[in-house]
Every structure is written in C-alpha cells, then in structure tokens.
Image (tube, rainbow, N blue to C red):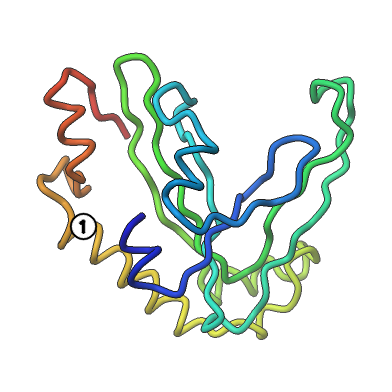
Amino acid sequence: MNYIFKETDLQIFDLAAPFGQKVKEYKSIVDITSSFDLKNEKSHAIHFQLWSPQFKGDPIFNRVELNPKHCEGHSFRFSTEGWGLIQLYLGGIKGPYLKHSHIGHFNQKGALKWEGVNHLNGKVDLWDWKAIKKTSDRLKYMLDKKLAVQRKGSYGVLMGAAQLQHQGITLIR
C-alpha cells in the first residue's frame, strides 16, 4: 500500500461501500487500517477499485437498491464501477488461514464483449487500455519481483504474510 500511495497516482476506492454508506476514497494507510479489522475478516477482507487519471475513463459511483429484508434493514449501498478500473482484493485472516491477495482488471477485448450487456460501466472506448495495462503490470512487478520475500507456487509472498506464516498462519489460495 505504501508503494501505491507514494509512488503512483492511483486513487483507491471501495469496490462496494458498506450498507447505507457512500463509497470512500482511501488516501493513506491510516485510512485503511482505521476502516477495517484486518485480523478478523472474511477470506477476502477488503475489495478496492484502483483508478488513475491516466486511464481516461471515469469511475462511476452507482447506487444499488437493496431489499431491507435481506440486508440488515438497509435499502441501498454504493459501488464503484468502470471498465478500466483495477480490482485489488486483499486477503484476510480467518482463523489459522491467510487468503492470498489478488489484482485484476478487464482488458479491452473482454470489456467490449460485455459492453452490450452491462450498461452501468459506460463506454469501453473512453478508457486508455495501454495505460491500464502498463499500470497493472508495474504494480504486479513491484509486488511479485521487488517486494516479495519468498514464493508460494507462482505467487510472491510479501514480508507481512511471511511473518504471519512463521507465527503459524497457513497461506492459502
């Protein structure tokens, strides 16, 4: 997260805001650590959408109507949508397990395939797909090659996860 905040122009938003709340933008590690219980979460503890002005397209903050009977009495939440956003899922600790983290995004071909079905995300051609891929590749390179202290299969393991592993936490996919 330090790399994202200090070395990139990426902006970090909730993928889906908590019930009844608007999407939050996180501007520091303190914003994140004060918003989430990182030690007692579900398997993917935190879901973010990453966006850069270089991507050209704009994130869309969509209000999602909910049935209060199934959502603890809440009638809405907000989500962050957009074809060219990069998803960052941070794995959480659940019991003796730490779930792996994940980075992903649409490519232009995949987005075009879904454009006719999903009208929430706007137009695919508004996004700079080369900039998205370049940013994603840099982020993945930094995580897998520069910051990883060991490997688990094809995945790089960051220092914090390696320390948890040494404390008896099992790393899982």
> What residue is rendered at 16% in x and 61% in y?
145
> What residue is rendered at 36% in x and 54% in y?
1
Q: Which residue is mark 1?
A: 144
Find residue 81 and report its horizontal and vertical position in percent. Answer: 68, 60
Quarter of the rendering occupied by the C terminus:
top left
- Helix, strand or loop at label 1? It is helix
From the viewer's side, name the closer residue of 35 and 131. 35
The kind of residue tagged 1 is Asp
From the viewer's side, name the closer residue of 126 and 23. 23
Find residue 96 and report its horizontal and vertical position in percent. Answer: 29, 16
Q: Pointer 1: residues within 10 angstroms few (<14), some, or many (20+)?
A: some
From the viewer's side, name the closer residue of 14 and 65. 14
In this view, 80 is above or below 76: below
Q: Quadrant of residue 73?
A: top right
The number of numbered badges drawn on the structure is 1
- For residue 108, side relative to residue 156 (left or right): right
> What residue is rendered at 39% in x and 73% in y?
8
- For residue 35, side relative to residue 63 (left or right): left
In this view, 29 is above or below 162: below
> What residue is rendered at 68% in x and 57% in y?
80
> Furthest-top residue in view?
95
Find residue 34 and report its horizontal and vertical position in percent. Answer: 50, 37
